[in-house]
Each structure stands twice: as structure tokens, then as C-alpha cells.
Amino acid sequence: MSNKKIIPIGPYHPLQEEPELFKLYCEGEIVKDIKWETGYNHRGIEKLSEQKTFDQVFFLVERICGICSTSHPFAFANAMEEIADIEVPDRAKYIRTIIGELERLHSHLLWVGLAGHFLGYNTVFMWAWKYREPVLDLFEMITGNRNSYAMFKIGGVRRDITDPQIREIKKVMQVVKRKTDLLTGAVMDDPVIHARTKGVGILTKKDIADYAAVGPTARASGVDIDIRRDDPYAAYGLVDWKVITAEAGDVFAKAEVRLLEMYESIKIIEQCLNKMKREKEGDTEIQVREIPEGIGTGRAEAPRGEVFHFVVTDGSNSPVRHKIRAPSYVNIATFKKSCVGQTIADATISLAAVDPCYCCTERMAVAYDFASKERLYSGYELLDISRRKTEKIKTQKSQ
Amino acid sequence: MKTDKLADTIIAVFEKDLLKIDYLKETRLSVHINPGAIVNVARFMQVHLRLRFIIASAMHTGKGIEILYHFSDDATGNIINVQVVLDENKPEIESLTGLFTAANWIEREMYEILGINFRNHPNLEKLLSDGNWAEGVYPYRKSN
């Protein structure tokens, strides 16, 4: 053990909603093992949900994640509508789908930016976050909020999307499409990004099955699963789109899957906008008076993967039991496979590739010698190691 | 495979350990089994039916401590819940970590919130409260 160093990542950053502590056990430059501690900010949401009425639970679960804040209400609505055995109006289905896909767009743009930041490509970071802004502005226009949109309720949605708003969304989609072309070109054709991400943090199909990983993490390893297609909900069965997969399982494949998924999201949104025009304006909900006794399993494909909600009801106005499984719960555990054997310089991007809800380099606190407690690297220095590696490759490529 | 055909397959293989089948919806099925058969049933789900383990939900009900293991059939969109009831005075069941690593964290969580003992779990420690919670107090038991 004497020559092993431990690098703690986390546990806490005031800006993050999901504090965790990762300890990287290193020998020299190589990560030999990884251990984690969770629960630093356990909010007891499942227990809290039992004390809320069904309408209040939507606002509660919306606050589980700050980035994909609509996927939890989406899954919860699916579970409740399964128990009540109701079908929402088509217009509500289209609106739900549009909100879900706009969220995927801004979440993937956020990830592309962060990935660029980790690698030392701050231009990609600035671009991606700049082009994410118009999507957030759309949310503000449709829902009144840039995040935590409060759009969902049992039986439909709380607000309609009007014709002028439809025109505005279409206009912004054209802009986002052009900018996505730009970003995709910048990422896919850059030899330095290839060198930094190809063959790094590989997850095999077997790893995915063992850890039951979901979302782009699974699809980048050739596991063709997507709840939107496999167990269609809202309007996903009514529009034409395809599931993006890649085979390599490395960081590059995960970036590729996310970038190409953005085109599919734009495609889905445009079709929904066209189709919802045929539905009667204002027909966005059905009245649900009672929720019977029963159990419901609702799921939704969040930007990071499948969100799963299990609800038990007893005929009253609150859940008896509400189990929630967010995608990061299963995806984060795959770090054990993707980081071990990598260098410290690659650990940052391997961790970020899963798009866990804690993506912030500030959390790369310090690296210290386990035996002597002597400090090795600060958080900024760790980020710097990753960037220096990129610079080194850039220099080699230009010679 | 449709859920009724799935149910027929499960009935044929696990006749002795099967207690009840609930046909919830076209794509949803709940299979109640003896807790002793959980490893065999989960293996059958994973290996023969090629289902993906989603998560497990545990709850304290009038019958005892119940666990529902949720499996997803991604080819058809079906969800199969494998349901067991454990004695609330001594809740104990075999761990599924030998079959898939995905069971590791959730079993630790269930151990922590309801005090269920998972036999042969490699590291049955608290997951959420990092050891800061009082021993023997289980927040999701209905007496609390």
C-alpha cells in the first residue's frame, strides 16, 4: 500500500445537486482501484413523497435533478396514469414530448461543453453553452421558467403551446441545428480529441449488462436500448426517429451518441410541432378525480438514461410507497470498470463521459499520499494534468 | 413475448415456488414467489428470458417486508415485478450480487432503510447515511 496514492474527488460542491466522494487509488500515474461514498446530501425524497398529495409530488420530483428536471415528473405521470388507467389527449402528448426533447438538447449541449472544458477545449465549452441559451429561452417562453418547468400533471400538461410559440420554437430549432453541425464538426474531425477520447474509459457490452447501465452510456457500447422506442410513452410512438448507437464503448463513442441524438431530438420536436397543429387548441388535459388503489411502474428516457418510478397507492391522495431510480444510480457504478487501468489524466474525462450529475472539476479536490498525508495535486492541478496531456498531443500532431 | 406467454413460461418452470401472478396491464406483470427461490428466478429472468434488472423496491406493509425486483424486457417494453414477502421480525433473503453487480448498491440501500439482511452480499454496509444514522432505526419501517 505504501506506493499507492488516494485521490479524492468530491464530496461536496455548493453548486452541485448530487455530492459524492470518489477515491481513486493510484500507483504512480495509473488508477488501480476506485471507491465511492454517497449520501452526503441525501434528501429523503422517497419518504417525503409519502407525505405529499399527488399534485405536490410533481413539484418535489422535479427538484431531484436540476438539469433533467422534467424526466422525473414524466416518469411519475406515466406511473400514475398507469394506475388510474387513463390516456392523455394527443395535444398533451405532443407537448410533453417537446418539453422532454428540448431538455435532452440543452442537457447534451451542457455535456459537450463540459467535456470540452475537461479536455482543455474552452472554445467548445463557450460555444456549447452559448448555443444552449436559446433552448433555455424557449423554456422561459413556454413555461415561464428556464428550469423546473412545472408543466406536468396527472392527465395532461399545465400550459398549452400557442401558435406564435410554435413558430418561435421552429425558428430556434433551425439555429440549434446549424450550431450542432458546427459542434459536431469541431468534435468529430479533431485529431487531438480523437487522441484524447478514443480507446479511453471503455465499457464493454458485458460491463453494461453487469451494471445494468442505461442511456447513452449503454448505447455507446452497442447496447440498443431506449425506453422511448422500447416502451413508448407520450408521442414517441407517433413520430419518426431512430435510436443512435455506437460500438466502441469509449469516451468518443459516448460523445458521438450524444451529438447525433441531438439531431433526432430536433427531428422529433419539429414533427410534434407540425402534428399538434391538427389537435384542438387548449385540449391539454383530462380531469382525473380519483386515483384508485394499485401499483404503477412509470419510466421515461432522460438525457442520461432510463428514469424509473414505482408508485403504490391505496385510494387516498398520497403515495404509500414511491421508489425512484435515477439513471446516474446505475451509471455511476460503472466507474469501477471505466477508470481502473487509466492514467489520472484520463480519469477526469472517463468520469465525465457517463455524464453523472456531478460534472464539475471543482470536485477534483486534492490528491494526497495515503501514508504521509502529503498533498500531491490540487483540484486545479488535476484539471491541468488533463489539459497538459491535450496540449502535448496537439504539439506532437503539429510537428 | 407477451406478458401472458411470459407468465405461462414462468408457471411451467417455477410451479412449486410460485404463489400468485398478477396481470396488471398488457405490458406489466407481477410474479409472487417464495423468497427462497429468488436467486433461481432472477437467474432465469436474466439468462433465459434475457431481461434487464432495473432496480428493486422494498416496503413495509401489513404482510411484512416486501421486495419487488423490477425486470425490463427491452425487446417488448414489458416490466416484470418479482415480488417476495419477508418476515418483518427477521427479514432475510439471498443477495443477487452473484448474478449482477447492479444489485450491490440497492441491496445496501434496502439493508439501510428497512434492515433487510442480504445473505452473501460482499459488502453489506450503509449506502446513504455513511454510518451517521443510529443503529437499529429503520426510517422506512411503518412504526417509525
Image: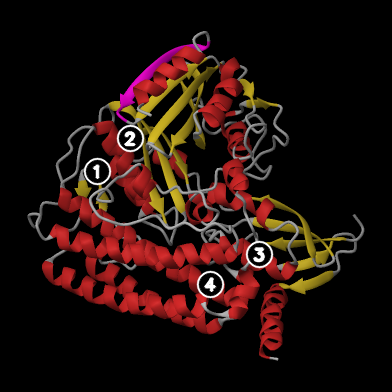
Query: Please, what is the three-letter code of the amino acid marked with disc 4?
Result: Leu
Give coordinates of residue A340: x percent, y percent. Answer: 73, 56
Q: Secondary structure at mark 4?
A: helix
Q: Main secondary structure of the magenta part?
A: strand
N-terminal-most mark, 4 or 3: 4
How far apart in space, not on screen, are marks 4 and 3 (Cα)?
Answer: 17 Å
Q: Quadrant of residue A372?
A: bottom right
Q: Which mark is residue A318?
A: 2
How far apart in space, not on screen, are marks 4 and 2 (Cα)?
Answer: 39 Å
Subunit bearing disc 3: A
Query: Please, what is the three-letter code of the amino acid marked with disc 1?
Result: Ile
What residue range appears in magenta?
B17-26
Q: Which mark is residue A200?
A: 3
Q: Secondary structure at mark 1?
A: loop
Q: Secondary structure at mark 2?
A: loop
Query: Please, what is the three-letter code of the amino acid marked with disc 3?
Result: Val
